[in-house]
Image: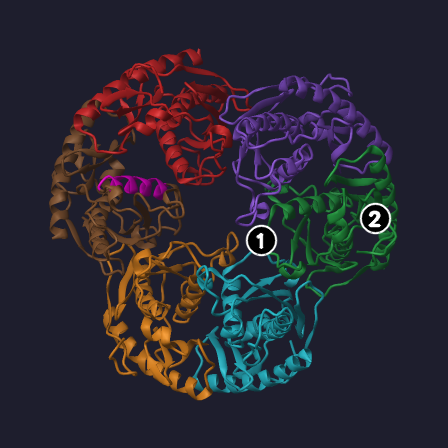
Chain colours: A red, B brown, C orange, D cyan, E green, F purple
Amino acid sequence: MTTRRPTQLRPVTIEPFPSAAPGSVLISAGNTRVACTAGVSRELPPWLAPKPGEAPKQGWVTAEYAMLPASTPQRKKRGADSRATEIQRLIGRALRAAIDLNKMPGVTLNIDCDVICADGGTRTAAITGGYVALALALRHARKLGWIERDPIVGPVAAVSVGVIDGIVRLDLDYALDVAAEVDLNVAMTHRGQFVEVQGTAEHRPFSRKQLDAMLTLATSGIRKLMAIQRRALR
Amino acid sequence: MTTRRPTQLRPVTIEPFPSAAPGSVLISAGNTRVACTAGVSRELPPWLAPKPGEAPKQGWVTAEYAMLPASTPQRKKRGADSRATEIQRLIGRALRAAIDLNKMPGVTLNIDCDVICADGGTRTAAITGGYVALALALRHARKLGWIERDPIVGPVAAVSVGVIDGIVRLDLDYALDVAAEVDLNVAMTHRGQFVEVQGTAEHRPFSRKQLDAMLTLATSGIRKLMAIQRRALR
Amino acid sequence: MTTRRPTQLRPVTIEPFPSAAPGSVLISAGNTRVACTAGVSRELPPWLAPKPGEAPKQGWVTAEYAMLPASTPQRKKRGADSRATEIQRLIGRALRAAIDLNKMPGVTLNIDCDVICADGGTRTAAITGGYVALALALRHARKLGWIERDPIVGPVAAVSVGVIDGIVRLDLDYALDVAAEVDLNVAMTHRGQFVEVQGTAEHRPFSRKQLDAMLTLATSGIRKLMAIQRRALR
Amino acid sequence: MTTRRPTQLRPVTIEPFPSAAPGSVLISAGNTRVACTAGVSRELPPWLAPKPGEAPKQGWVTAEYAMLPASTPQRKKRGADSRATEIQRLIGRALRAAIDLNKMPGVTLNIDCDVICADGGTRTAAITGGYVALALALRHARKLGWIERDPIVGPVAAVSVGVIDGIVRLDLDYALDVAAEVDLNVAMTHRGQFVEVQGTAEHRPFSRKQLDAMLTLATSGIRKLMAIQRRALR
Amino acid sequence: MTTRRPTQLRPVTIEPFPSAAPGSVLISAGNTRVACTAGVSRELPPWLAPKPGEAPKQGWVTAEYAMLPASTPQRKKRGADSRATEIQRLIGRALRAAIDLNKMPGVTLNIDCDVICADGGTRTAAITGGYVALALALRHARKLGWIERDPIVGPVAAVSVGVIDGIVRLDLDYALDVAAEVDLNVAMTHRGQFVEVQGTAEHRPFSRKQLDAMLTLATSGIRKLMAIQRRALR
Amino acid sequence: MTTRRPTQLRPVTIEPFPSAAPGSVLISAGNTRVACTAGVSRELPPWLAPKPGEAPKQGWVTAEYAMLPASTPQRKKRGADSRATEIQRLIGRALRAAIDLNKMPGVTLNIDCDVICADGGTRTAAITGGYVALALALRHARKLGWIERDPIVGPVAAVSVGVIDGIVRLDLDYALDVAAEVDLNVAMTHRGQFVEVQGTAEHRPFSRKQLDAMLTLATSGIRKLMAIQRRALR
């Protein structure tokens, strides 16, 4: 277990990760480690592809989430599962909220979040680190001249909160997550507004009051994560 | 579009649906129609199966969600997609919150939610109707003598809320959903406690104040849905 | 079991079914219930697609058959199986026989037959109901101006016949089907001509004389089904 | 095209085929060539497997049908398709009619029909040749002592008939099949009784009179095929 | 087991095989039998397809390898497996070495190697027989006028060698292959140069000296195979 | 391109990699980086599983190879492809040669090789790094008491060699690999014996003399890699 105070984040770092992608960072939160890599391409998904002769009107951001087999003590089989599908849809929505898609016409950002070590909070780490990778890949796209104006609306970061033994706690590791009565993942912008709120009663339903306390704690945690993002992007 | 007041539900009915399953209802919310069917079996999923010679300690509730090809104006291809995967995980978690799994050892409840006509709010209708199907299937399991004590902790129902043109609205149909800046799905118990809260900023992030207003409106809507569930179960 | 006379159909109804497809009916034959829905699109299958610059010469009719999980007392798993594959090929061939494909150039009719409750005779009910859905969808296509001339050659309906304990019987329900020595599915036009004849010896081979008796009984049953089709299309 | 008389079979041979299976023949009908191989195993399909401690009550016959890529002038892609699925279900049913499954408890016969050259009539050739392979494999199973009594009820053979330009013809090759208004596949026992009758109107529906003429012609053709089967089994 | 001398090939024949492909032979090596068929098409794989308006610069050779279910004493399930994947990549590379792809712009050669009876050495037989099928298909393509100049650089053939009980042996059948300490597959040109060398220590690693002896023996065996290829192509 | 001398390895390091697996290293060879992780389990593959009541007689080593999407400049799609299938079979065979499987009855070693950055030589790096991960995982298995005697026969390492512009070169990076006329991958034991030799003529066949030169150069390179392995295991 942990000796952190309930309102404290685990130690978080965002470092360069040596892949071949233009945006490539490793985010660590305690023992959780997620490689977040971002590339750009000029292929839009079919439902956004312009008609022949027309110019594209917008861009797209897509995300994939996977766990390396060695990321969990018991080896994780390769291949998509329903949990990963749910998580990568969450990551994609959260990161699209950081972007004005109209300012990157014809450009797709591919974010890959590969979990190297899983100790709770991998989906929120993927969002927080994924934003940094995305921002780096956009710098690359601007250098290539694919994008004229900066499409970033503002940073997005995410954290988990929960209730364990009646106490509201920030940034659950695996042991806390298993013990939690409620698990809430929150993604926010730098202005303190929500882009995703996903709360699940794991063992028993939660009250409006508990929800309020969790939202307040998540807000404070995300502010700290955004400072770490800013440093990584300097 | 709709002439409903922002705080009003669409007309909701829960009727018997003539399938072969012991719990089988059709829930309609405006033009949205979802067949919710529930059956019981004595096969546990592998991760809950007891060792040979041991008695099972708990039961399980599993849910599947699918859309009939004719449920949307443009024909929907058959087969699972990532949206359906995310939705059926939500339905399963919400319905498990209605049940004390320890009171149905060795029994699995299978809930199937098949969308017959989709006009917004299919996932929340599936939860609200799915609870009724589940309760009917449990009555059947008790008649069979598979379950001794009633495992129901209390009803669960769900509704969507959103913000359209700055106004908080209850129970979004498809036209409202497309126009919504925020889309929040809420599942609650009869005691007014949350089992799932899933909010997504579709176009722009939402404030704490908007979230609060949406949660309040969802709570009032769910109370009405629970009255309709009670009537269906009488 | 049944107290019907061997030459009697089960009670059959064809009613509107509230989906989003332009042709949408529910056919009931005793406890068997199949939702038959039909839509039109302007996408031809690849092998009929005209070369760029050329006009399409014909249209197409395609059918899919599936069973809802709750359609059988023991839950039916989702996903195609070899029985469904064989059945939907039969339905497609039978319904194409009702149509002059040259009179609907560039238009595809998609028929979906989703079994809601299965008590024998689902494939023949799907053909009989599918024809009605198809005819309704063609009216829609003509309103849209996609088709100029009515492509319908004439109605098609289908019924099963069999031999049980040496007696030739019409319209087998599940209990009869299990007991049958022979199972024959017949699809016919309104002129009393065959479009499909599929007979299978389930337990012992059948004589030419038995086949003749079954064909005669099927012909009389199909005439009654066509009267019900006509009423549904009025 | 062909200069055969309408009532004449193509030249048919059934020869040994050098595979590793105990029953292994190559059937040729004109240019059509199908390798029919049969093996025996002591694994029953799951739905027939006896409970632990109980003896199996019956056996099973299963069939697979596939086309080699080089069997058609335009290369055929590998892998199952819906046509093959429908055909192998037909072959399996027809061959099971040749066998008393209760006389081969616990034994499965696997028949594989691999089309080497396709010029019409592959499914009926597969049944006719498959019966010979099956009979050879049963001799092997009796030598192994797996089966005590001969489970063969009698031979089964099959042929196609059709109507081309109003004329009823036996044993359609590809050119005739394409031109046919009706295509009827018939499988029979040595006593002149039917095990499968599958007739399809390809371009226009067919009358009872045409069906009668086709059944009579098929019966005469199958008698000749059974003489060839007998010689192959001597 | 075998009474062949260690330096002797099994009896090898290459005969016409009656499929619908322009190049179609059956190669036998002892009891091993592989149908090698080759066709030509004017569809290039996507990564070689020229841009619209441009002429193709080269052609392609692709190979597939599969085993018929009856090719092994214990029935082989249909469908690709990892061993087949590895083998067909080897066959494709070896056969491409026989061809100047620049001399067949826009043409794809599809080689299919279907194992009819497997008694060791199927992959090398597939290369040796595949070359003959490929050469026959190219003659066909030249008759069609699809290819102007002969793209064949020279023949390619292959053989296996191994070490059994310390003795270097040519052309391993199944019994020898199972007993082998080393298994080496070698594909060569008519000039005695290597196009593929694949050696695997099955039970214990092998020395440089053993490798040298195996390469020498393989070279002599391949010379004999090329004489058989030449005869088959006359 | 590179300024290395033809007989020189790229800079190679083997460092700890922070996953959850007991054996977990990152091997770098120039810009190529592969995470090699190894775990142990007590589940044997089906074909080695002992009968009920019997003790297992041997263990197993299995390997998987995959590339992270960001490992190549153009994003690599997730999911197995035929190249990966061929490579992971090579890795598995090479690593099994390092082990006496009879000394680890009932234990399976799972090696995962995940390419983080691909600049040529990923499969040989996977073998060299995979051996170190395997050795670390075996130490763990011995601590758990699952294995009594050390099953390691000796280290295995691998390197690529090739011919570029007629010059034999060691350890090809991507630019050299693309230019190579021949590509040879060699895996050896510490006693200088071969466990795998895989040579492919990429553009033109290679002579016996070239093969000899490549084998000699590979042998010297592997000796250096084994020194790096030893240091990593100290």
* Residue F10 x, y percent position in the rendering: 69, 19
- Near-viewer residue (A122 or D217): A122
- Comparing labels 1 and 2, the label whose residue is closer to the camera: 2
- Near-viewer residue (B94 or B161): B94
Residue C177 at least partly seen: yes
* Residue A150 x, y percent position in the rendering: 41, 19
- Mark 1–mark 2 Cα distance, whole angstroms, equals 31 Å
Residue A85 in which image quadrant: top left
Name the secondary structure under disc 2.
strand
On screen, residue E154 versus residue A26, left or right, reads right
Q: In this view, does A45 lie above or below D143?
A: above
In the rendered image, residue B86 lying in the magenta stretch gets the answer yes
Count numbered badges in the picture. Answer: 2
Magenta segment? B83-98
Quickly name the residue at label 2. E170
Quickly name the residue at label 1. E79
